[in-house]
């Protein structure tokens, strides 16, 4: 570690991992309620479990991105962070807001929560992923602004690199698109149309810039490949991301009331969407092959390659499979969407956070060469447990989606939604099993932090 | 393949391509916003429909149901529930909704449960009006079948 202020990343990483454990735990609870409707009902109805599950995911990714930025920006800018104090205050504001919001979801009925948090003054609640009460949304704005200011000031006062420029672009547009979430039109169709400006353009555009920047940083560090070369790849990847991702928003506009031309625009752009992820695989593996140094932290490189491969499968392949308009006619609003969502979020965003944590955490703990071989072996085990768990879970959900489509949408003898769900119960049981494997994988990952360093003789 | 591409070429593809995509997106967005009122039959969007949508959000209905394909997959799609449960007749549908909402949660062991939201009769009717309005949106012929 070159600069002491990089240490502010540590609480961000630790908190992100704690939230991840909570996120998976609520996912498991949902998997059980899917099978046994009386489980936890009426104590925690499904919509509350789901809200906690998805909101924890969003917040933990933001914590991960912030930790990653506070770690890599000083090293890229070749100076201390502009204000480590602000970064610590931001951490606490965000952590307290996040925890209070989750407790609010769990202990106050949602309708009552809307009344308690002034939703009548500016209604923004009750939309998927954007369920947060107004004070939380304002808190997120404050936190993100403080984060951007800190990163920007550090970059302006120090060395400017392609990595920090890309990171900044991602952060800036992420903040800009979040502001759309404060406007909820009375017309449901316009509401949905604008809702995607935050949701899609976060996940399939601005966050991918941040992902690209973090991946490039770690690859430079662990492969020693020339920066010029890495920069070129980074530009190519994010170029494809922007071209396909922005117009790819159109694949959400097929069947919710938007004009017909989106059927074409969305399909064509979606066909290109796997490309940036494919380039990312080439990037990670080529850099690994051409590496100039052999870093002792092999897990960091393993995660880096893993994130490229799994996000290609989840976001690229599974996304492409059902975003052509004629296919989406049948798959829209089924478990196939859930399958795609799970593997993309895990592959692209959870794994990039594991990548940077695996690289940076040992350094912050005074182990510049990475964790000892025994700890890395355990971490590798957790890598496979989580990957196999997530792929299994995704395939189960995809199977459920196909069964649902055959039951409800194809042929003449159709089943109703609830009957169809009953026929899928076996698959949902398998899904829950793989979910348990993911959780055990995460616990194994946690255990790898506590493996004692071997004494160097 | 990448040997022939220089860093500055890659940079230009990024800025040029990104701007190009953004401009097309902005143009089409502008056009869509103009078209949506007609495609969604906005003139039929009465005060009751608007209240119904507010109730939909206040009770986080999208946390279990999908509406026009978006939401959670725990409970049925409601974009065409008017046709499915009301046979496209407003009186039939409203009567059905009053009975259905009052009966929740159903006492069937381990069936997925819908909470009791304690809505007034007026509120249930507003919810029905919102769902009826939604069912008439021009969705490019989605859903493929009545079962949703």
Image (cartoon, coloured by chain):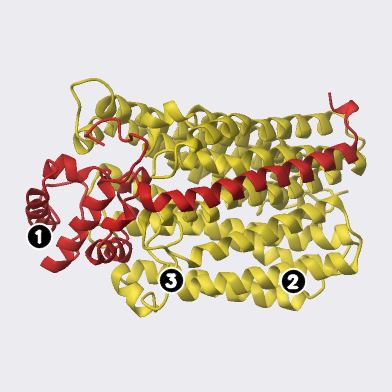
Chain colours: A yellow, B red
**Mark 2, chain letter?**
A
Q: Quadrant of the N terminus of chain A?
A: bottom right
Name the residue: 69% across, 35% down: A276
- Whole-percent x, y for residue B68 in the image: 34, 44
- Dot 2 surroundings within 10 Å: few (below 14), some, or many (20 or more)? some
List the residue tagged with mark 3: A133
Name the residue: 86% across, 59% down: A75
Name the residue: 74% across, 60% down: A69
In the rendered image, which quarter is residue A403 located in? top left
Residue contact at pointers 1 and 2, CB within 8 angstroms = no
- Dot 3 surroundings within 10 Å: few (below 14), some, or many (20 or more)? many
- Whole-percent x, y for residue A93 in the image: 59, 76
- Dot 1 surroundings within 10 Å: few (below 14), some, or many (20 or more)? some
- Above/below status of A22 relative to A428: below
Residue contact at pointers 1 and 3, CB within 8 angstroms = no
Of B143 and A159, nearer the camera is: B143
Residue B85 is labelled as: none
List the residue tagged with mark 2: A149
Question: Could you tell me how far apart the alpha carbons at marks 3 and 2 are, in whole angstroms?
Answer: 25 Å
**Mark 1, chain letter?**
B
- Above/below status of A70 relative to A379: below
Q: Secondary structure at mark 1?
A: helix
List the residue tagged with mark 1: B102
Question: Could you tell me how far apart the alpha carbons at marks 1 and 3 are, in whole angstroms?
Answer: 28 Å
Of A259 and A175, nearer the camera is: A259
Of B50 and B6, nearer the camera is: B50
């Amino acid at each position: 570690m070159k600069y002491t202020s990089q240490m502010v990343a540590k609480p961000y990483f630790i908190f992100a991992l704690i939230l991840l454990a909570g996120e998976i735990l609520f996912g498991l609870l949902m998997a059980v309620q899917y099978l046994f409707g009386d489980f936890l009902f009426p104590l925690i109805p499904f919509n509350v479990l789901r809200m906690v599950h998805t909101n924890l995911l969003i917040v933990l990714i933001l914590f991960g991105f912030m930790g990653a930025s506070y770690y890599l920006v000083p090293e890229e800018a070749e100076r201390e962070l502009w204000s480590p104090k602000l970064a610590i205050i931001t951490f606490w504001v965000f952590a307290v807001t996040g925890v209070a919001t989750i407790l609010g979801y769990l202990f106050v009925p949602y309708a009552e929560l809307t009344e308690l948090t002034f939703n009548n003054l500016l209604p923004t609640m009750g939309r998927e992923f954007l369920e947060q009460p107004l004070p939380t949304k304002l808190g997120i704005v404050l936190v993100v602004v403080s984060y951007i200011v800190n990163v920007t000031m550090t970059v302006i006062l120090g060395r400017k690199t392609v990595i920090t420029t890309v990171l900044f672009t991602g952060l800036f547009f992420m903040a800009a698109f979040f502001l759309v979430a404060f406007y909820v039109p009375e017309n449901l169709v316009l509401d949905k149309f604008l809702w995607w400006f935050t949701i899609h353009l976060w996940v399939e555009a601005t966050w991918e810039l941040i992902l690209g920047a973090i991946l490039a940083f770690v690859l430079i560090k662990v492969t020693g490949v020339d920066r010029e070369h890495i920069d070129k790849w980074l530009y190519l990847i994010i170029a494809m991301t922007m071209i396909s991702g922005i117009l790819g928003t159109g694949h959400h506009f097929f069947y919710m009331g938007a004009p017909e031309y989106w059927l074409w625009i969305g399909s064509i752009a979606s066909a290109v969407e796997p490309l940036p992820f494919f380039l990312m695989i080439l990037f990670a593996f080529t850099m690994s092959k051409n590496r100039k140094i052999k870093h002792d932290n092999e897990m960091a490189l393993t995660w880096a390659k893993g994130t490229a491969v799994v996000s290609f499968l989840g976001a690229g392949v599974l996304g492409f499979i059902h975003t052509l308009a004629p296919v989406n006619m049948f798959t829209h609003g089924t478990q196939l969407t859930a399958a795609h969502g799970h593997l993309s979020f895990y592959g692209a965003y959870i794994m990039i956070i594991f990548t940077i944590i695996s690289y940076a955490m040992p350094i912050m703990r005074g182990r510049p060469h990475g964790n000892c071989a025994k700890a890395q072996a355990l971490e590798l085990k957790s890598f496979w447990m989580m990957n196999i768990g997530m792929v299994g879970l995704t395939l189960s959900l995809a199977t459920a989606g196909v069964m649902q489509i055959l039951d409800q949408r194809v042929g003449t003898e159709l089943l109703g939604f609830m009957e169809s769900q009953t026929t899928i119960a076996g698959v949902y049981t398998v899904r829950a099993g793989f979910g348990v494997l993911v959780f055990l994988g995460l616990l194994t990952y946690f255990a790898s932090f506590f493996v004692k360093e071997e004494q160097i003789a | 393949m990448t040997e022939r591409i220089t860093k500055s070429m890659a940079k230009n593809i990024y800025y040029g391509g990104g701007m190009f995509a953004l401009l097309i997106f902005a143009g089409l967005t502008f056009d869509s916003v103009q078209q949506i009122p007609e495609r969604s039959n906005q003139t039929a969007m009465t005060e009751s429909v608007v209240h119904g949508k507010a109730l939909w959000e206040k009770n986080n209905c999208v946390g279990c149901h999908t509406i026009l394909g978006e939401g959670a997959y725990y409970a049925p799609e409601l974009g065409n529930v008017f046709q499915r449960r009301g046979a496209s007749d407003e009186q039939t549908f409203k009567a059905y909704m009053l009975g259905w909402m009052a009966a929740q949660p159903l006492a069937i062991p381990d069936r997925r449960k819908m909470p009791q939201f304690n809505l007034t009769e007026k509120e249930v009717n507003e919810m029905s009006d919102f769902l009826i309005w939604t069912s008439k949106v021009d969705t490019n012929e989605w859903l493929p079948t009545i079962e949703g």
